[in-house]
Amino acid sequence: MKIAFLTPEFSHENLGHSGGIGTSIKHLAIALVKQNHNISILVYGQKEDGFFSEGGIDVYKIKNPKLKGVSWYLTKKKIEKLANKLHKEQKIDIIEAPDWTGITSFIKPSCPIIIRLHGSDTYFCHLDNRKVKAVNKYHEKKALKNANGIISVSNYTAALTNTLFGLKLDYTVIHNGIDLKLFSSKTFISNEKTVLYFGTLIRKKGLLELPYIFNKINEKYPEVKLVLVGKDSPDIKSHSLSTWQLMQSLFTKEALLQVEYIGAVPYSEMREHIEKATLCVFPTFAEALPVSWLEAMALQKPIVASNVGWAKEIIDDGEDGFLIHPKAHQNYANKIIELLENEALRNQFSIAARKKITSKFSSEIVAKQSIQFYKKTIDAHSFS
């Protein structure tokens, strides 16, 4: 099968910064190539038009046309023209796009379009208690209604999406997956006890709760380190240009001395930071189904994560991780401390976590499930 992914991001050094959507698409694309499918990536929002091919994946860089008031419309029509050209040349059979900002709202290609719900702007604004832009909500709803099929990375995300848009769309849940070969676990011995957070430094991921949590850990275990790896970001509520700057003022002086902020690193280097950690923390408020959790679990790291929404679709609390509300600072700190103190429990969580990723969240499994959905959608489109 020939599948195209239309996306604002893809994890590759030639394409700029990539977040969770870009990472999840890459894991899936690699798995599909291994199963002998042809993959094209259409990445809009690029600085220039271009094309390159790597690892059996064709990448089309799309520069958005700039014309005040109609740039988004022109971009969509440019994408539509490219998609129809590739379909006519028999290079693609189906297109998958994310729900973010409704990029496909005015795109009507000659092949079917699938939307995979990674979390729309409407969805994340709701979780973050912010007002969504009316234009974004309009395009996201239109794109969903026009799609030939809907996949969601979590049941929670799909159900909430239907509620927020007042829709009753049929959907199939196919969780995000990761390439287990890239995240094969190995023993890393360290005398330091290190708590790791990796991901964007941003309010919606609980980064302004983490200082309060770590302060309580520091009171009991002043030698424990907190390591932060990820891109800094502005804070939309305070209008600060730096979430990291806001965080520093929330740590006690003693706790801040034990915090190391590394900043953004290439994806290829992330594994080393995970392996060095004693455990990982994700006190987030807003996700769909985070790849970062899967990566930490695949590398057999016990995690303490948020108990919001999607979390129970990944972690069974007390069996392969702990789930605590991010604002329950003392309870959250207590679970981290429990893992720091109890090596047997860390080992128990580590083994159980890896087993779950292998059985439910490998990209090989996700690729097979996706292909079944694509085939069903193409068959339905052919007879419509």
Image (tube, rainbow, N blue to C red):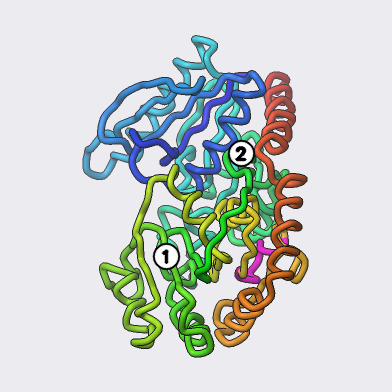
Q: How many numbered discs sit on the rendered protein?
A: 2
Does residue 170 show up? no
Which residue in the structure is indicated by mark 1? 228
Specify whether 321 is left or right of 88: right
Q: Secondary structure at mark 2?
A: loop
Compared with residue 383, is residue 355 higher up or lower down, i.e. above or below? below
Point out residue 349 in the picture as x, y percentages from the top left corner: 72, 63
Q: Position of residue 140 (x, y in %)?
A: 50, 49
> From what the image shows, is residue 69 above or below residue 305?
above
Of the 4 image quadrants, the one containing the C terminus is top right
Q: Nearer the viewer, residue 178 or 205?
A: 178
Identify which residue is drawn at 64% across, 78% down: 341
Q: Amino acid at mark 2?
A: Asp
**SS state under label 1:** strand
Can you give x and y, in whole percent of width and height, for residue 162 in the image? 65, 56
Q: Which residue is mark 2?
A: 179
Q: Amino acid under label 1?
A: Leu
